[in-house]
Image (tube, grey):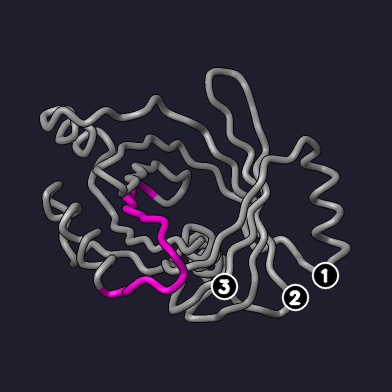
Amino acid sequence: MREIEIKASISSVESIIAIFTSQGVAVSDPVTQRDRVYGQIGIDGAGENTAPWLRIRSETKQGSTKHIFTLKRSITNQMDSIEHETEVADEIGIEHIIEQLGFEIYSDLTKTRQKANVGEIEICIDAVNELGAFIEAEKLTADEVDYDAVIRELWRVFESLGVNHENEVVDGYDVLMNKKLATVIDK
């Protein structure tokens, strides 16, 4: 399965939820997600690398937590990936397996996410600790899909929400956090 997405920074989560509400689009309750992303030693997550990345997501909703293990590998850029995931019962066990495979922790961040659906497009409205508010539009597709056509479709949804290209973000949250931490360390 191929996941194609776009992302943009937004001024507030509440403003996007208000637009969805006015359009009659249901928005999910907030979910807290802690994402631990692992990469191969010496591989930088930025840019257009095609190395595999592993993630353990601990997702807490209404006091209940589940753990999801994900493999992602970029196709054309960070927002265009082959993705496979499965729920796991033992997050510590999978963490040890990942380390034994030669991967190291790349980032560890927490966000609060709410979702909405516009047709086959999933919208994620995120408040990411230490980074700010963002919106993502993503579509799961067949591997051989026309990438540019899907991107145009996603941007039409963003534009209907008042989100424009000048706020586009091309890095994943893990890369954004590492860039922020590097800037803090360099000061």
Q: Are marks 2 and 3 in contact (CB under 8 Å)?
A: no
Q: Where is residue 108 shown, x and y percent of the image?
A: 62, 52
The crowd level at tag 2 (other Cα within 10 Å; few <14, some 14-19, many 20+) is few
Q: Position of residue 21 (x, y in %)?
A: 17, 28
Vertical arrangement, residue 14 with respect to residue 121, above or below? above
Q: Mark 3: which amino acid?
A: Gly
Magenta stretch in the rendered image:
132-148
- Eyeballing the image, is 15 above or below 47? above
Horizontal relation, residue 119 to residue 142: left or right: left
Image position, residue 153 (x, y; %): 21, 61
User: Is the residue under label 2 in contact with that under label 1 (CB below 8 Å)?
Assistant: yes
Any magenta on residue 135?
Answer: yes
Q: Secondary structure at mark 3?
A: loop
First-in-chain label (1 vs 3): 3
Q: Label 2 belongs to which residue?
A: 41
Magenta segment includes 12: no
Q: Which residue is mark 1?
A: 102
Position of residue 105 relative to residue 115, above or below, is: below
Residue at position x 51%, y 66% from top?
Answer: 175
Q: How far is disc 2 from disc 3 in space, using C-alphas?
A: 11 Å
- Kindly indicate whether the residue at mark 3 contacts the one at mark 1 (C-beta within 8 angstroms): no
Q: Residues within 10 Å of mark 3 (few under 14, many from 20)?
A: many
Q: Quadrant of residue 144?
A: bottom left
User: What amino acid type is highlighted by mark number 2?
Assistant: Ile
SS category of the residue bearing label 2 = loop
Name the element at disc 1. Answer: loop
**Which callout, 1 or 2, points at the residue further toward the start of the chain?**
2
* Residue under label 3: 45
Relative to 125, does residue 154 appear above or below in the rendering?
A: below
